[in-house]
Amino acid sequence: MTRTPALLATNLVRDFGACSAVRGVSLVLAQGEVLGLLGPNGAGKTTLMRMLTGNLAPGSGSVEICGIDLRDRPLEAKAHLGYLPDVPPLYPELAVGEYLRFAAGLRRVPAAAIPAALDRVMRKCGLEGTGRRLIGALSQGYRQRLGIAQAILHEPDVIVLDEPTVGLDPAQIRTMRALIRELGTRHGVILSTHLLAEVESVCDRVQIMHRGSMVHQDTLAGLRRRGLSLEALFMQATTGGGDTEDAADEPAALS
Amino acid sequence: MIQLIARKELVSLFGSPLAWILLALVHWVLAWSFLARLDSFLHIQPQLAMIANAPGATEAIVAPVFAMAAVMLLMATPLMSARLIAGERHNRTLALLVSAPVAARDIVLGKFLGLMTFLCVMIVLATALPACLLAGGRLDLGLVLGNAAGLFLVAACFASLGLYLSCLGTRPATAAAATLGLLLILWMLDTPGESGNLGLARDLSLLAHYEHFNRGLIDSFSLAYLTLFVVVFLTLSSHRLGGEGLHDGAGRALRHGMLALLAILVAASLGYLARETRTQWDISQNGRNSLSQASVTVLENMHGPLEAVVYAAPQDAQARDVRRIVREFLARYQRAKPDFNVTFVDPAEHPDHARKAGIQAPVEMVVSFRDRHERLDQFNEPALTHLLMRLARPGERVVALLGGHGERRPDGMAGHDMGAFGSRLAARGYTVETFNLAATAGTPAGFDLLVIASPRIELREGEVDRLLAYLDAGGNLLWLVDAGPLHGLQPLAEKLELTLMPGVVADPRARDLKLPMTVALGIGYGRHPVTRDFGDTTMFPFARQVIVDENETWRSVPLVEAAHQGWVETGDADAAMAFDAAYDVPGPVNVAVALTRILQDREQRVAVVGSGHFLTNTYLGYGGNLDFGINLVNWLTEDEDLMTIQLRSVLDAGLAFDEPTLAVISATLLAILPLGLLMSGLIIGWLRGRR
């Protein structure tokens, strides 16, 4: 591949005390690709994403965003990044509009472009008419969509979404998936989830994490071509090792 | 970016009622204490006017309120600072800031700026309190400004420490408690303990530095310390927050520890430099931290180091920190004379030193200048400046008492002698000697003042001529004249254009003091350097009336009017005394006069007192006799500057409010303003919530 990948992570490691959460994970995300990060709860997905977005320092390994090293030039690298953490970073005491304007300012969106960006993102995320409402008074679904709105409002090259559809009703999930697919045509999107259906419906490629390591990766097209079901692959990758002692702290969270 | 984050902090703060409630509460407490102080000031104002060097309104009301405001800020800041970072971590919102292209430094500065803006609102509200006083009088605006600046700086210290502790953890409550605890320790660091050794603790104490501002003093070291404090904690905050995305685990803690150590070392060395080059400026308009011009002039004329050893226990019987009071008093002198060195000695620890120095009072100091020493047990500006003047005086002043005619002796211990007064003069640096006309020839010379104290043997004509020649040559003279014959000194009286009336001044008021009626009580004093600011009663036994004849030669000022309800008894003084309108002159009676004339471009000074008894050993301790005598000698030996160090009067001495104004101010401060703040908070909260 001659084009610079949107995101390139090499051999990321992170320990929390004696417990290692991520052990040597590498991944590549191309522009215009949606990568699904699949894994049971506790597989290290959130830790990995925090490292990818500069929220957590890796013990070793490196992250490049659009070819810029996150550690050496963090501000430039982060300018290409949009991030929705597992808990949306919302200030309940702010109004939706205030919050989005603040987020746009933080992402260095030029002041003149802010109203248009707000309009666009609120329409896309179904937040029309909520601009003056306090975030603390919003329902769970709105909060989740507002979380996505702040991540995409500056049209970043890399969008990292940690469990974006949690707390949404089925209709909202459908629109959200459509939105992610649309984002995936122009941006690089990394999406973590434990929902197989989500990966199947929106992702171009899937990587499966288990106990801090990348255990399998393939394109969805490739899977289909080989006639493999994602579910079988997932079961095989995450329970195949058959360590009974691990089964207790990693209950397979399949739906 | 800093502005954006600061603005968001303010929206978060003022969007919730908490900030408004806090503002209203702090304001209400301050306003209450302010009004209480104002009320008591208005009550004691008449008494204050009587006290020399009384504090002005700003010092009495505003400075304590600001000191209290600092403590309120100390309590309030941790509540606001703890949530800045720890709160964001707790609510998991920090990811928004950290994943955005914003430097940790900008996040820290933005948060700090936001909090400081809020604290500034509190400071402005606190400053609005003294502004109310402008409705009733003047204020020492310099002192107000110094206080506001000090409050701003300590608020910045509180905020920066709070912000740093907030960066360390994820729990706002823990951060708040830790901030409050640390701030309290830093604040009270200089409260003296058993040891009384405060060197470093005092240098580190926030309160000690704030107190300079509170007194209207800009201290370069305090300024540097408080600024370094803020810079260190902002740097540490920024490093701690930025390190999170760069390093993990133990490596990060180690790096941060190293930086903290480095920052503290750099700050300590800069602080040390600032301490060594410390200067202070008194910005209060009343100049309460400065010396009067007279004292400054005295110090300027003292070339060479000045040493003071203060014998004082670390605490006095009432557990007050007397050393601190003395230190602050002497600091005014040290500001004007940097080579004024002060050391403290505990007399209980070194009783031999104290005995050798002749220490008697519980707090006393020995001041040394060029191998001359003087003791002092009063710590006020006139006393110390007088002492310094005596130390600085180039030559000894010589006071000569005429002898050889049965005069009162300056070394005699008999009741009619003046030994006590003589030794008092000696203690003030005068050389007192007896001058015998028979032992010398020509015009008397070799002394600064000649005293003629009640001769009892006739002076020969030649002797009188020599005394007259002394006067003609411009010599200064103190003549104490008893009732009765002049023993040949009539020509002297003529020379001075005086009429010395026969008869003894009788004063029935003396009986109230269980004294014979022949003691005349001096109550009214003339406007003269000798009697300036003189309030004591003086007592003149067997006094005679002194009348100045109209003349062109001498400028005269009557010094003492005695016997306001008495008279000059022309009858037999030993018999029953009663006012006889036909013969007696009614009081008040002038018994002392000061005369001056210009002779060869210098002022010749003469004083005549119609009583030789008032300075004798028997009567010296009566009323203000001693002080009057000393003042007389000081003036006559041309040391009038010594007499009163004119203390500056304060410009904000008086406040006058009529009842309605006072009621409006109280209502505004206690009800309208706090309620307004509360209502604003509630209304804003309600408006934001309902849309």
Image (tube, coloured by chain):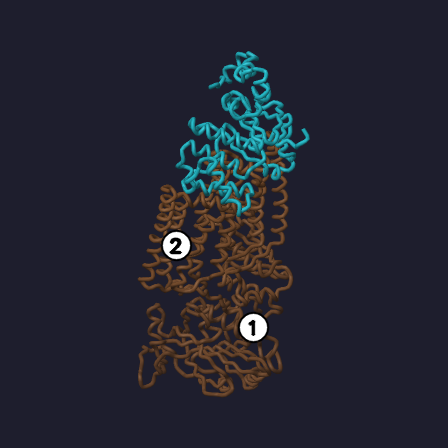
**Label 1: chain letter:** B
Q: Is A196 above or below relative to A125?
A: above
Q: Nearer the viewer, mark 2 or mark 1?
A: 2
Q: Residues within 10 Å of mark 1 (few under 14, many from 20)?
A: many
Q: Is residue B162 visible?
A: no
Relative depth, front residue between B272 and B266: B266
Q: Is A232 above or below relative to B163?
A: above
Q: Which kind of residue does numbered mark 1 sit on? A: Val
Residue B266 position by quadrant: top right
Give percent across and percent down for residue B261: 62, 39
Q: Colour of chain A?
A: cyan
Can you name the residue that lies furthest to the right here?
Answer: A2
Q: Is residue B342 visible?
A: yes
Give the residue drawn at x 48%, y 18%.
Answer: A254
The quarter in which the N terminus of chain B is drawn is: top right
Determine which of the numbered discs, if any, sits on residue B399 in the image.
Answer: 1
Q: Colour of chain B?
A: brown
Residue with the mark numbered 2: B34
**Label 2: chain letter:** B
Q: Secondary structure at mark 2?
A: helix
Disc 2/disc 1 C-alpha distance (Å) = 55 Å
Q: Secondary structure at mark 1?
A: strand
